[in-house]
């Protein structure tokens, strides 16, 4: 009788011990997962803040160079009309308004097409086009292209082809009062290292009477102001290869901006 009681007591003790070990192990695993998730989120936030600061510095440099150019242009007539023995001081102030336009994400299934990139057609345009004609077209400034990975509701920049979910194309449409206000159709063309357009759409070119392949297209509402634009293009990871890529931004049969980026 005493032996049975001792055996039962040992079994109960072992059971309680196992339950305690399992509970402790589960809590340690849960804390480890939460700690890893928190570290990943902190790393993501630091990367996002760093990228935002870099973008701000880049746009500040661009705006500063524009202001310096405008100031020099404004001072030139005064200098030419002022005698050499006269000291003329001028103080100029300028304000540049920037309007943020949020485009809907662009969905594009990437397909390899052995078509001629639009840049080669644009380069065939001779220098006979005057400055007055070029002023009728938009111009994309500060073009920045990055591969991005979506983690929860956050966006993380990456240049690893296997981890990319979308390609983000950001740029600024410069001020141009000759371009009509309203919706402007913008085409995006991504050329891979094998000089093939990752095409999902076609862009009719009336000048050369042909269709040029493009990766995606979107609509931007333009109000004759400097307008910041970001387009997110979905990509098929299986179609991405390592190497140098080129992005062309097209408006009205013209390349208005271009940028290069690299995937590893």
Image (cartoon, rainbow, N blue to C red):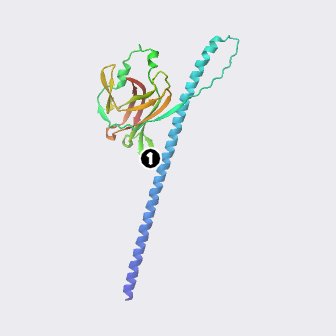
Q: Is residue 116 left or right of residue 35?
A: left
Q: Measured along the vertical axis of the image, is residue 124 above or below residue 219?
A: above
Q: In this view, does 130 lie to the left or right of 216?
A: right
Seen in the picture, residue 226 relative to 80 is either above or below; the reply is below
* Closer to us: 166 or 137: 137
x, y percent for residue 22: 41, 67
Q: Quadrant of residue 184?
A: top left
Q: Mark 1 points at which residue?
A: 153
Q: Which of the pair 69/160 is nearer the observer?
A: 69
Quadrant where the N terminus is found in the figure: bottom left
Residue 57 in view of the camera: yes
Residue 62 location, x and y as percent? 53, 28
The quadrant of the rendering that contains the C terminus is top left
Q: Which residue is located at x 45 percent, y 20 percent?
A: 136
Does residue 7 sit above or below 194 in this rendering? Answer: below
Which residue extends farthest bottom?
1
Q: Residue, x 39% and y 29% (percent of image)?
A: 185
Mark 1 secondary-structure assignment: loop
Classed neighbour count for the residue bearing mark 1: other residues with Cα under 10 Å, few (<14), some (14–19), many (≥20): few
Q: Which residue is drawn at 58% across and 18% down?
A: 73
Q: Which residue is outermost to the left?
A: 114
Q: Please tell me which residue lies in front, 217 or 264.
A: 217
Res. 145 visible in picture: no
Tally of numbered discs: 1
Residue, x 60% and y 15% (percent of image)? 76
- Residue 12 position, x and y percent, is 40, 78
Q: Where is residue 204 in the image (x, y as percent from the top left)?
A: 32, 25
């Amino acid at each position: 009788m005493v032996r049975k009681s001792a055996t039962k007591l040992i079994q109960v003790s072992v059971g309680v011990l196992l339950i305690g070990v399992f509970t402790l192990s589960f809590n340690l695993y849960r804390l480890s997962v939460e700690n890893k998730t928190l570290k990943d989120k902190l790393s993501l936030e630091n990367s996002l803040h760093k990228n935002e600061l870099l973008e701000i510095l880049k746009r500040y440099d661009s705006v500063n160079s524009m202001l310096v150019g405008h100031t020099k242009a404004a001072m030139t007539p005064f200098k030419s009309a002022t005698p050499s023995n006269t000291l003329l001081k001028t103080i100029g102030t300028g304000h540049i308004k920037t309007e943020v336009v949020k485009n809907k994400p662009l969905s594009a299934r990437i397909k390899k097409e052995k078509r001629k990139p639009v840049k080669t057609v644009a380069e065939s345009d001779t220098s006979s086009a005057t400055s007055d004609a070029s002023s009728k077209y938009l111009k994309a400034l500060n073009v920045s292209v990055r591969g991005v990975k979506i983690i929860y509701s956050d966006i993380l920049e990456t240049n690893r082809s296997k981890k990319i979910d979308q390609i983000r194309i950001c740029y600024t449409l410069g001020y141009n009062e000759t371009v009509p206000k309203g919706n402007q159709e913008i085409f995006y063309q991504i050329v891979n290292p094998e000089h093939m357009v990752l095409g999902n759409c076609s862009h009719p070119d009336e000048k050369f009477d042909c269709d040029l392949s493009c990766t995606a297209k979107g609509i931007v509402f333009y109000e004759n102001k400097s307008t910041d634009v970001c387009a997110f293009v979905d990509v098929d990871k299986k179609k991405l290869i390592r190497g140098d890529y080129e992005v062309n931004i097209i408006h009205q049969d013209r390349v208005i901006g271009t940028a290069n980026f690299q995937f590893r």
